[in-house]
Image: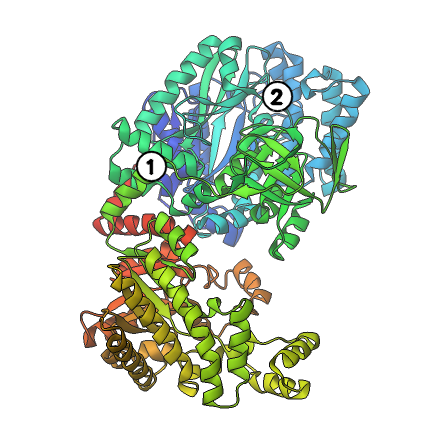
Amino acid sequence: MSTTTTQPLVYFFGQGRADGSAAMKDVLGGKGAALAEMTSIGVSVPPGFTIASTLCQTYLQTRAFPGGLQSQVQACLHRVEAATRRQFGAETNPLLVSVRSGAALSMPGMMETILNLGLNDATVVALERESGNPRFAWDSYRRFVQMYAAVVYDVPKERFEALLDERKKARNVARDIDLPVDDLAALVSAFKSLIEQETGHGFPEDPMEQLWGAIAAVFESWNTKRAIDYRKLHDIPHSLGTAVNVMAMVFGNTGEDSGTGVAFTRDPSTGENVLYGEFLLNAQGEDVVSGTRDPQPIAALAETMPKAHAELEQMAKRLERHFRDVQDMEFTVERGTLYMLQTRRAQRTGHAAVRIACDMVGDGSISEEEAVARVPPNDLDQLLHPTIDPSAELDLLTTGLPASPGAASGTVVFDADDAERIGRAGDAVILVRRETSPEDFHGMVVAKAILTARGGMTSHAAVVARGMGKPCVAGAQGLVVDEAAKMFSVNGRSIREGEWITIDGTRGHVHAGQAALIAPELSDNFLRLMTWADRLRHLKVRVNADTPADAHRGREFGAEGIGLCRTEHMFFEGTRLQAMREMIVAQDSAGRQAALQKLLPMQRSDFEGIFRAMEGCPVTIRLLDPPLHEFLPTEQEEITKLAHELGKPVDEMKRIIDGLSEVNPMLGLRGCRLAIIYPEIPAMQTRAIFEAACTVASRKGQVLPEIMIPLTASVAELRQQARIVRDTAETVFQEREITVPYLLGTMIELPRAALTADEIAQESDFFSFGTNDLTQTTWGLSRDDCGRFLPHYLDHHLIEADPFQVLDQVGVGRLVRMGVELGRKARPDLKIGICGEHGGEPSSVVFCDQLGLNYVSCSPFRVPIARLAAAQAALSARGTMDRTKATL
């Protein structure tokens, strides 16, 4: 033991009194805080104590417990003994406990639990004598030995399952609890022998040794791969640590008058206001969540245990009303008596989150501001995923439980490592397992959907899939998974690894092949939530759109303009590409202008369509940005074909293409540099923009073009390009006899531009931060190559997040802040936005709001996410978000 401390390390709860409360989540973890709160309000909770989460990191760094902890644990253990009238380790009336994890932010299934701790060869006899149920006693002992060895000694649980399956097969029984007592006792001995074989030491008989081993193992489980992966996915700080909850056991496996289950106060998939969940008779909690037995729906509890069901319904309403949010509850019924083992804020799908928020506003439980604050912006992405086209011809393989809504197609894989490898390569995969376990988490992250042969609506697969917004079908009927042979069979058919299937998680259907999918329709509740969000936010949200179709889609999702129209995307098809290539290979200005004249009407038509789609809203158009070699072929066959089409010798065409190659093209001849060398290009594009604007304006349309110069590094570059734009605009206005108001600005995507923003602002009406390139040039990273090492950086915590996905507020953000401050110091009315991929990432949106930007711009399907994030940023600035989170 290390140095002592006077700070409380252990907090008791029981008999209507608790040392902690719901406000102490940072110390007690979510589970410990909820247990304390439930105890304080009179809920039937078995007594126990919580070891503070603050000790977790200390233990992981030193592998030692602090001085004073042992005495505090012993004192709380005596209080539990007094509350239960049992004694830990006694051969009469023995006290058994569970040991569970519990971080401040919920991580369901990611850390460890041990049940029935305190059993040994003596106390199992006492339990058998006291209960009058030998099967129950030895089944509990068998479970404890298996669980303890797997968690504390890391003995693979499959080794124990194999021994158990052998016994069940020999007895021709399906359920563990149907084995005779002698077999259960024999399994305990066999399990202990396996432990000694695997570890070199025996199973501990001393209950106190068992307890300290379990406490250490729970702390250790904070750093398992699945826990780390989960924290990365959900942006949970690695520094938090987990608390340890020790609680007196209550038993759901004492007979048919007992059971255990998981219940939600509302349906976590749809948000419907009904008690939802599953239970198992004569079982312990691990049976429900592991998927090893198929549970019954919670409604069936009303038939088998009507009194317990009625009490559970009342408890659900009480807890939801007290915590003012939907609850995820674990319960056990021991010989007809209901005990609550846990309650926490229920994870839910995006669909359910929106519906629940709106319904709770409707019944007066929460305010509109609280509703906006409660829905995670990224959850809206789930509302925008495709579903199966109703007109599609489907080949139904089987049906199962609709564990997580949405639809996806992919090739079948049977191993989480394979799913991760193939999925990260960019291929769509569906992970198929008998049942998933926390060890499969990394594969589930990249899979498009999950299919399991076993398990229910609250199984591991179902809970994790819902949390990630991935479609899942669990407990598929007749599905036989042969993971070794990499195939599954169902209803006389076989599907092998690499073959396509489609998962409909909303209906619980599994189809062979790749079904047609369609975009979802947005619900009335979604529109209500977005209306509330729009009232609250200050930050405008635009869309990145290069076509009229993208512009229309962006407006449907609430975009208030276009923040980035990439003109180069208009050149990569058909006759446009051919004309572009003619321009590139031309040897003089006259040749380039001739080719550009072919492109002019095409560009003009594109811009007319975009202006009409965005009528009344600003449209920021970036002039040509990429290097010219991107428009030319690289394969010899294609080069030869192009040479013949353009009437040039193949050798000359090859020489031209080779002459355009660059060692580092992202830092080469592109952006405004290209426009300076070939001024015919910006002149043509500017003419096309203003001619299109004049055409739409002459038909009484309201047009608000914003011309954006890319990759500016100095005010001299911008000044030269601005002259071309302004001269062309005046010429077109005189020709068309109409004037259209417009803005001229630049992208700030190079560190030098941010450092000299005060100079650049003198020639600019607006800035738009191109954070994709700004991240590249600030970090010295190539987006195309950093995939080789960024995962290593992330895994070893050298960086907290991929800087191309989440804005680096410390480094890149400092340049953005400097650019904003310098720019507005020189020009107070400077309009400023962001148009990189970070424009739709919630934490980056909050940062932009804090800096006082006018708008963010993102892809169409991220627009609702940015709108909600902007509203939450406004609430956070007022302190409302913090107050709302404190109530959850």
Q: Position of residue 196 (x, y in %)?
A: 74, 38
Q: Position of residue 503 (x, y in %)?
A: 60, 37
Label 1 is placed on what type of residue?
A: Leu
Residue most toward the left? Answer: 828
Tell me the residue at 59%/18% (across/down): 253
Q: Is residue 342 visible?
A: yes
Graded by Cα atoms within 10 Å as few (under 14), some (14 to 19) or many (20 or more), the crowding at tag 2 reads many
Residue most toward the bottom? Answer: 588
Q: Is residue 184 above or below residue 841?
A: above
Instruction: Using the rendered view, name the quadrant where residue 352 is placed.
Output: top left
Q: Is residue 352 left or right of residue 491?
A: left
Q: Return the residue at label 2.
A: 123
Tell me the residue at 46%/72% (across/down): 776
* N-term mark: 2 or 1: 2
Q: Is residue 403 left or right of residue 827?
A: right
Q: Position of residue 319 (x, y in %)?
A: 35, 25
Query: As rendered, which of 509 and 235 lies closer to the eye?
Result: 509
Q: Return the residue at label 1.
A: 888
Q: Secondary structure at mark 2?
A: helix
Q: Is residue 584 above or below residue 776?
A: below
Label 2 is placed on what type of residue?
A: Thr
Mark 2 or 1, closer to the camera: 1
Q: CA distance from mark 2 to mark 1?
A: 40 Å
Q: Position of residue 549 (x, y in %)?
A: 43, 54
Graded by Cα atoms within 10 Å as few (under 14), some (14 to 19) or many (20 or more), the crowding at tag 1 reads some
Query: As rendered, which of 76 and 711 lies closer to the eye?
Result: 711
Instruction: Using the rendered view, name the quadrant where residue 275 is placed.
Output: top left
Query: As rendered, which of 762 and 776 lies closer to the eye?
Result: 762
Q: Secondary structure at mark 1?
A: loop
